[in-house]
Image (tube, rainbow, N blue to C red):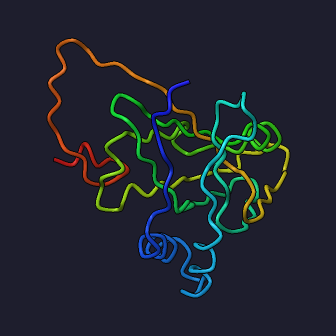
Amino acid sequence: MRRIAKFHKVSPEQFLSGMQDSFPEYTEADIRDMYESIELPRRATKGSAGYDFFAPFSFSLPPGSTIKIPTGIRVEMEPDWVLKLYPRSGLGFKYRLQLNNTVGIIDSDYFYSDNEGHIFTKLTNDSNEGKTVEVTAGTGFMQGIFLEYGITVDDDAQGERNGGFGSTTKQ
């Protein structure tokens, strides 16, 4: 097994900015407490492919609702690798919890973005059974899997990333 990546927390200031943008009801003190409790993603067993991401705060998501979560996490990885994000299997199976972009893609150069490569996720409870998703702080809600990728023989990409969602198309 190759070791190709390392998870880090974003800075306290970056987490504060992400939380205040999405959740203005939390005080700066609340957010700093959340930051201190953030756990780095980890595998549950030696045979697990996915690294569990843990909720930085508790949330309830009724059917049809969406939430944008700043994870407080960034990842440093070797070039030619990508981190793909999915809902935890049990949450997807029980509640049809889905990432709004279906699969989150974290590129290796995202780590160097202005936002420190802060990983955000947007989740929707797509339950057709009327079930509300309840996630408590510190509970795994999403998983990430590292995959190696290739490029075409005539690839000549020279662009530099600076930002997240859609940043590579903002020229």
Q: For the point 43% across and 42% down, which residue is it?
A: 106
Left or right placement of residue 146 versus residue 11 in this view: right
Q: Where, quadrant-wise, is the N terminus in this rendering?
A: top right
Query: In the displayed structure, does residue 85 sit left or right of residue 140?
Result: left
- Residue nearest the observer in this picture, 10 or 142: 10
The residue located at (70%, 50%) in the rendering is: 141
Residue 35 appears at what percent x and percent y? Answer: 58, 72
Q: How many marks?
A: 0
Front residue of 111/156: it is 111
Identify the residue at image location x=73%, y=65%: 137
The residue furthest top is: 153
Quadrant in the rendering for residue 50: top right
Q: Quadrant of residue 154?
A: top left
- In this picture, residue 16 sits left or right of residue 124: left
Report the residue at 74% width, 39% height from top: 92
Q: Position of residue 167 (x, y in %)?
A: 28, 49
Question: Where is 67 relative to 25, above or below?
Answer: above
Front-most of residues 60 and 35:
35
Left or right: residue 120 compared with residue 110: right
Percent position of residue 79, x then y: 33, 33
Front-lying residue, 62 or 112 = 112
